[in-house]
Amino acid sequence: MAERAARMMPASSTALPLALTETPNGAAKCPYLVVRDPESVRDVLHRPADFSPANALVAVTPLEGPALRMLQRVGFALPPVLASNDTGTHGGIRKVVAGYFTPATVTAMEPRIRELAREAAGNAADQLVRAGQADLVQTVATFPPAVVMLGLLGLPVRDLADLKRWGLDSMELFWGWPDRDRQLELARSAAEFYVWLRRLVAESVAAPGRNLFKSLAEHGLSRTEMCSLGYFLLIAGQETTTQLISTALFRLLEGSAPLGWKEAASETGARSVVRHVLATESSVPTWRRVAAHDTSLGGGRIPAGTQILLELSGNRITAAAERGNSSPQAHAGRGPSSGLVFGSGIHRCLGAKLAELEASVIVQETAAALPGIQLRDHEPEWIRHLSFQAPRTVRVMNGPG
């Protein structure tokens, strides 16, 4: 429990004057050194011995007693395995997981992705006929990425509504700013997810055929390590894609994308829009690192233990922090590019190509199936966590004529 609690609690700030990231309500709670210049971001990501990923999955808001006890009751534990692993075991584990995301495997998934996208777009069209309005987040963006992810990993496609709820709740628990009461609600959800995941791991290891957890067991991972890896992979592998799709659809319909809705109905147009969103407003706009020892970055000294927030694409959180930060490490530089949005180096996102493919196909098929729609709500509520962002809804209606 002590190790788990330590990994959930944010480390204290250092003596270096840090930029303060601001929560959506304006309260500065999360002190980080914000690094925005793409070359400096890349430098940090390519120096894992200097800038450790050990804080990548640490809860932004310290979890209080009731939430911790709720997790403890189900044996919740998240030892470092993949994204936060700074030990020599990382490379071998990553190789096992990467075997499920090869270019050939991703390419072979396109017909299935397109089938799911057309079915989802058809459901949205039916809802528009019946009700005169539809939410594209729920009708087209939510479930296809989860179906694709589970199928790709050789896991049973089931309990999708629960998986989506658990994913959103866990994002808020680990990357949001929940108060004590909200933490308890989210911890209850996380505990449910962990119990479900533990059963899935046991079932998968004993199942015939190839699947991720069986492969990890053959590599020598314990059940607890497999649950830790699966906990965040089953969230990141599909929920961030749902959020990317949601933002792309919203920006297209809002009119701030470089192309219009009609152009997005083509393969080229949809891909262009998705890449624009990745570069400017990705669903994962920031990620964290911590200085493993005294080091330097961009000509400035970085003391050991400095908590670092890397900007991968545009977002409101680090933009607010940057305005009050004159530190030499937080360079203004040129704007972010899609080349960094999935990270870089030995911890680069393994599902980058899959996410871009899914988002492009779903945007294309939705635009093609719903040619005359308009936004119904131009100011939806947004998910605004430290490292995740997207509109919660994209409500549309049929346009005139």
Image (cartoon, rainbow, N blue to C red):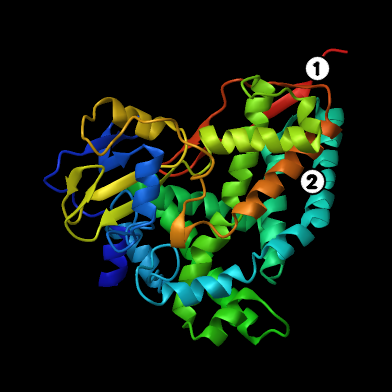
Q: Residue 122: x percent and y percent?
A: 85, 40
Name the residue beneath numbered marker 2: 117
Name the residue beneath numbered marker 1: 399
- Looking at the image, residue 196 sits to the left or right of residue 259; the answer is left
Looking at the rendered structure, which numbered label has been put on residue 287?
none
Camera sees residue 130? yes
Which residue is farthest front?
Answer: 299
Point 23% across, 30% down: residue: 325
Q: How many marks?
A: 2
* Quarter of the picture holding the N terminus: bottom left
- Looking at the image, residue 238 sits to the left or right of residue 367; the answer is left
Q: Quadrant of residue 218?
A: bottom right
User: Label 1: how many residues lie within 10 Å, few (<14), some (14-19) or many (20+)?
Assistant: few
SS for dot 2 = helix
Q: Amino acid at mark 1?
A: Gly
Compared with 364, 98 (above or below) is below
Inter-mark Cα distance, 2 to 1:
22 Å
* Quarter of the picture holding the C terminus: top right
SS for dot 1 = loop
Q: Amino acid at mark 2?
A: Ala
Point 75% across, 58% down: residue: 107
